Structure formats: C-alpha cells, structure tokens
Amino acid sequence: MTWWVKWFQKDEAEKTIFSPDGRTKCQFILKNSQVFYDVTRDNKPIVKRSRLDITISGEEPLHNRLKLIRSRSSRHQEMIEMLWGEDRYINNTYTEGVFYLAEASKAHRIYTIRFRVFDNAVAFRYEIPPQPKFSQVVIKDELTEFNIDLNASVWQIPAYQPDRYEYNYERCTVYDLKNSVHTPLTIKTPNGFYLSIHEAALYDYGSMTIKLNHDQILSSDITPLSDGSKAHVNLPFQTPWRLVMIANSAIELTTNRTMYCLNDPPSEDFSWVETLKFIGIWWAMYVGEWTWAPGERHGATTAHAKEYIDAAVRLGIKGLLIEGWNEGWEGDWLENGINNKFTVATKDFDLPEVARYAAAKNIEIVGHHETVGFIDNYENQLEDAYNYYAANNVHYIKTGYAGSMITINGRREYHHSQLGVKHYQKTVELAAKKKICLDIHEPIKGTGIERTWPNLLSREGARGQEYEGGALQPSHACLLPYTRLLSGGMDYTNGIFDIKNSVKRISTTLARQAAYFVTIYSGMAMAADRPFIYEERFPKVFNFIREVPTNFERSVPLAGEIGEYYIVARKDRYTPNWYIGGVTNGTGRRVHVNLDFLDEGSYYATIYTDSEDAHFRDNPFGINILEKHVGRSDSLDIYMAPGGGFAVSLKKI
C-alpha cells in the first residue's frame, strides 16, 4: 500500500516517516540545497540533525541548487525465513520513504535517498540512476553523518590497522574517538538507548568505517582504494544500506536482525547447504606439536588425516579441517604466500585418498586455502582450485587472508576496499556454483549477505582463540555478542579443553569452553582441540559439544551487559530441544535463569557449571555436571566463576 506520493519541485521540504509501531520517527529535511535527517524514539533523540551527501570526482558537489521533485511512502510487512542461523524467521516490517532529488543547474544530475524505518532500526541508502551526461562515476567521498551525543559511550576497534578487525574492544566516549573505527559500532547514549551503527548489503563499494569529522560529528569514512577514491561504479548504482540499530537495553540489541532484512532473498536453490561442526588438524600446530610446513612434524599428512577422520567418527563430529596440505608453506609463509599452489599437494598428502577414506566414514572434509592476501595469485588459480575440491567431494572450504594488506591487480589495497569486497564476493559466488560452503578468515565484515548467499556459513573478523596465551581477557567474549556478533556468526574456534598448555594458556574455565558453542554462533562451528584431549581427559564435557546444534529455530537472549556477561537460550531447528550458554568477565557472579521460554512439558536437563572454587587462572578445570528434570515454571540458579561460564542442554521428554 502506498501511503503518500507527491510530485513537486521544492527548494525546502520536511517529511516524517514513522515506524510501524509509531514510536520511531525519521525526518527527511531539505534546506538550503542540503539534505539532512534525524531520528527519534519515543520523542527522545537518537540521531540529531545529520548531513547526507556524496561527492563525485571531477564534478561539482551534488548540493548545487538541489530540489526535491518527488517523494513517496509505502508500508511493507512480511516474515522472512532463513535457511540457517540463530533464528529461522525474522520479522521484516517497515515504512519506506523515497525522495527523488535533482539539480536546477545545467548539470541536471539526479539521485534518490531511500529510507526504511523499522520499529527497532532506521536504514537508508543513496541510489544513483544513469545521468544525462555520464554512466560511470568515481565516488570521491561519502559524507554521511550520524550526529550522536558526544557524551555517549562507544565500544570500538580501530580501522586501517595491520591486523584488520583483530583488536581488543575498548570503551570511550564519542568525543574521545581520535581515529576511524570499524562497524558495527556499539553505542550507549546518555538518554538510555543502546545503538549500533553498521551497514548492510555491502557488495561493490568500500567498507564504511566511522570517524569524528571537523564538526565533531560521527561521519562515514569509506575505506579508500590505492588511488585515493572510494569506489568506481557503473550506473545505475546504489550504496550499501547505512543502518542504525536501536534498543532499550544491551541484551535487546543482540536480538536485532535488521541487517538480514536489508538483503535480498536467494535467487537460486541453496537447499544443498548444511551447517557443520568439525574438528581440525590445526590446534596441534598452534601448540607446537606439528607444523604447517612439510618436514618431520608435518601435520597435514595422509596418515594424520586418516587418524583424525577415525577420531571424528568416534567423537560423533561430522567434519575435519585440514590445513597445510598444499605446496607453499615452506619458510616464511607470510612473505612467500605468492608461491602458494592450491591444486598441488605436498608429497606426504594424498587428497583423493583422504577424500575417499572420509566419504567411506561419512565425514566431510573442510579444505583450506591460505592466500596470505596475494589475491592475484589466488584468482589465477581460483576456478581450478574450486574444481579440484569439487572433484574430490570437498563441500566446505576455510579461506584465509593473513597479511596487513592484499595485493590485487598488482596494487596493495586494504582488505576492506572496494576491490577487496569484490574479491570476497567473487569467491562466494564461485563457491555457490560448485556447491561449496565457505568459512572466511581475515574476511570482510558481515553485512547480512548470508541471506542472499547462504553458502557463506561463517567468518572470523575479530580476535578468536588463536589469540589466547595472553592477548585475550575474559571480558572479550562478553563484548562480542554486543559488538562483532551483531554482524553475523563468527568462527571463534571454540572448545579448547587443554587450558593449561604452556604454549597457549587459555584464559577461561572448562565450562566456559562448552558455553561458547551457544554464546558465539557459527554456521561452521569448530571443536578446535586435539581429539585425544576430548576422548581421554574430558569425555563427559565433550558430550555437550557433540549434542549442541549448529542451526537454530529461535534464539532468546536472557540477560547481560556489555563486557560483563551474556546469557542466551537457543532452540534446535529439528527437535524440541533447547540449549543455554552463559559467559562472564573476570568477575564471578550468580545468575538466576528463568526457563519460561520452554514449551509445555518436561525436559531432561544436563547442566555444566563452574565449581565454587573454579577460576580461570587458579582452577580452570573446576566443573560440576548436574542432571535433573525441569519445566517452564522452573528456574536455574547458577554460579559463573571469574572467567567462567555455563552450558545447559534441555531435551524434551
């Protein structure tokens, strides 16, 4: 239904778009040939008056005698179904306002700004149709402002750094931001709202970072190309959606799925996609038992692969990741990555034989491509490399882009530039053609394209457990649900049970490692430790990892605060069973968990909790396992030790 359509030519205009519940309000403003917007919720300011503008190389600014020539509004309501994820159904209900702008000058350039106002979010994008005088443009800059109270708190990681997104989150005020920071950018305002500034449907454009501009207003800072421009685009063109998520509490913010609503549904059949839990020839190399490079301690041998396949069968795990199987790992592999060969195995590894053995045991092989950011080398082999895996029935690939920059078309570029974004998308689309699923490390951030391309099952995109051994604090996993995980699932490489290993000392308790399989969602979830650790030392705790699903019907965040703790319940998509996970920071705490989210009936609960004397430094293995019957009228009183957590399985009787 169209709510209003107006034709006119106005030098000044104001139009208000209300959310379906009438509480969120976005105002479009044209004044002095400049476009602005503002956002309120319950008549309280969210985003104060903020500028919207784009500049094009070689052209005068767009705000040159700008007029509003037409506008229209409509209401949209649907329930979208996700093929996999944290929630099967997402409510996609919004009011849309579209504003068509044109210049009265000789250039006669035209463009559109499209708004969508949800109950819990506001999104907008720029749309540039073919112009009277040109069909290609170079975006010089995008001047999108988010005028947030300078006294608001933000949790941020820096942009344009060598380790991409892999930094510890730090809290400061908006006023104290000195340099560009990545999105999602989580904010707590003085008037009590929790916000996240992000983007959706990022395809052919540089990633948006955020900085304070000269007017002390948060503003977009699009990751540039090596020539200094933001993007080279053919018309018609539309930017990614700029998104402001809105909540009344930190825990409510974690339920926001608007990012997926701003992406298109799949245009082809992805019924072949399945989520996966897997072990890997990986952590043994991090703790120094094996190596990626060939030699006496080479990890990726045919013999080791078969041993791990047999272990996966015993453990009840469906997949096996094999890293270091191909030529190119010799010497300093970060410097020599240009020599990587993605269809040539080392002499001690026989991929066809390993694939045959895995198929006979009903185990999926997760292949591996570490590009080290040498995109030219990778793209030259890409089709052959994917065909090689497809021919050997390898349906999953973990890709990697270690290195501070990527090399593409002979130039050094940011991973998150337009060229980087286009490369990542190229791999996703080629993988889809070969019916291969991806888990991308050192990725471009998630912007909800998993709705359109469900074969993209997971990404890294933050510090994971490879940073254990000193670089991670217990608060890190209590920050991720409110920051990084707002952009989608993450491969955190969970389940490290060898906590006191002298090479990689883990800053968690044992119960917390089980909890990660619930609190940190991933469509490809890795049980990262060596099989003998699970089988010989902690088989009872591993039962939870074996049972917990990788695809959920519904998720219900129960309690939490940013950087302090997080508790969530998730229902399996294929059974009536539920799973709960909780983590805390370096402070121990007791929590009261109501089970009123359960369906009627009785459940058999297995509860994995920290013991009273557990501590991530002093007694990480202190764990209690309790079994009992519960129902929706019951509750659980649970202790989480410093650096600890808990996990619960609830099986319907």
Image (tube, grey):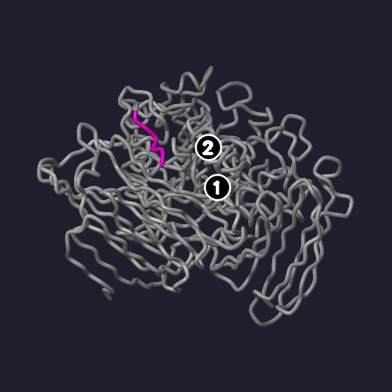
Q: Residues within 10 Å of mark 2 (few under 14, many from 20)?
A: many
- Point out residue 600 in the picture as x, y percentages from the top left corner: 66, 82
Residue 499's disc number: none
Place residue 418 in its image quadrant: top left
User: In the rendered view, does 44 fall on the left or right side of 77?
Assistant: right
Q: Position of residue 90 (x, y in %)?
A: 46, 67
Please tell me in which quadrant of the rendered image residue 176 appears. Answer: top right
**In the foreground, 578 or 148:** 148
Disc 1 marks a residue whose amino acid type is: Arg
**Residue drawn where x is 69% and y is 69% of the image:** 650
- Residue at coordinates 19% horizontally, 47% vertically from top-left? 65
Instruction: Where is residue 160? Give x, y as percent.
Output: 48, 31
User: What is the residue that sits farthest to the right in this orientation?
Assistant: 613
Q: In the picture, which quadrant includes the C terminus? A: bottom right
Task: Estimate the spatial distance between the alpha carbons at disc 2 and disc 1, rounded to whole Å.
Answer: 9 Å
Most foreground residue, 374 or 184: 184
Does the magenta-highlighted stretch encompass residue 223? yes
Q: Which residue is mark 2?
A: 165
Across and down, in percent, residue 327 comes to 46, 25
Judging by the rendered image, the residue that carries numbered circle 1 is: 484
Residue 266 left/right relative to 82: left
Q: How many marks?
A: 2
Nearer the observer, 547 or 108: 108
Magenta residue span: 220-225
Cβ–Cβ under 8 Å for marks 2 and 1: yes
Secondary structure category for the residue under label 2: loop
At a point 55% along the width and 47% down the height, the residue shown is 484
- Badge 1 element: helix
Q: Amino acid at mark 2?
A: Tyr
Q: Is residue 296 visible?
A: yes
